[in-house]
Amino acid sequence: MKRLMESTWVGIISIITDQILPFVAPVSGYLIFMVAAIMADSITGVLASLKENQKITSNGIWRTLEKIVIAGIAIMLSHGFETLWIPDIPMTKAVSAIIAFAELKSNMENYHRLTGVDIGAGWMDAIKERLFPKHHTPATDVPTDIDLNDAKKYDQYGSTDD
C-alpha cells in the first residue's frame, strides 16, 4: 500500500512538472501581477471602508478570492486560445490588461475615498486616449473637390505633389 501511494504521488508530481508547469510558466508574470493588483484593491478597499466606518464582512473576502480565481481562469483560457488556435492575436496580454485596468481604476477610487484626492480622473482619460486615439477616418481627410480627370496629381490622402 505504501509503495502504491508513493508511486501515485510520483505520478501526480510528474504530471504537474511535465504538463502543467510548462503551460503556466509563460503567463506566471500576468498571474502574479493580477493577484497583487486584486490584493491591493482589497486592502485599499478595506482601509477605505474602515475610514468611512463601514462594516467589513466575509462577503468581501470571498469576493476577493472569487476575483482571483476568475481572473486566473480568464488569463489561462486566453493563453490556451492564443497558444493553440490564434497565435497572431495577443489575447493573454489583452485580457490581462483589461483585468489590470479594472483593478487600477478600483484602486484609484479607493485612494480617493482614503485621501480625498482624485488621482483617477486624469489618468483614466489619458489611458483611454492612448488606447483609443481620436483620429480622422480616411474619408474625412480626402478633399471633395478633386477633378477625377486630374486625380493622378493627388496622393491617396488628397494632398498635391507640389
Image: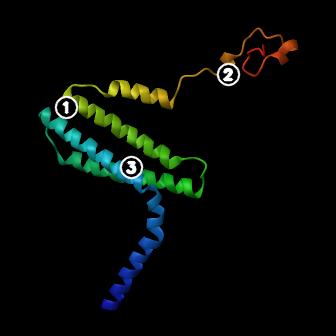
Against 119, residue 15 (above or below) is below
Q: What residue type is labelled 1?
A: Leu
Secondary structure of the residue carrying tag 1 is helix
Q: Can residue 54 be seen in this view?
A: no
Label 3 vs 2, first from the N-terminus: 3
Residue 132, image x, y percentages: 51, 29
Q: Quadrant of residue 1?
A: bottom left
Question: How many C-alpha atoms fall within 10 Å of the one at disc 3: few (<14), some, or many (≥20)?
Answer: many
Residue drawn at point x = 31 percent, y = 48 percent: 36
- Residue at the spot of label 2: 138
Residue 146, image x, y percentages: 79, 11
Marks counted in the figure total 3
Q: Which amino acid does label 2 sit on?
A: Pro
Against 6, residue 23 (above or below) is above
Which disc, if any, is residue 62? Answer: none
- Residue at the spot of label 3: 71
Q: Which amino acid does label 3 sit on?
A: Ala
Question: How many C-alpha atoms fall within 10 Å of the one at disc 1: few (<14), some, or many (≥20)?
Answer: some
Secondary structure of the residue carrying tag 3 is helix
Residue drawn at point x = 33 percent, y = 85 percent: 5
- Residue at the spot of label 1: 114
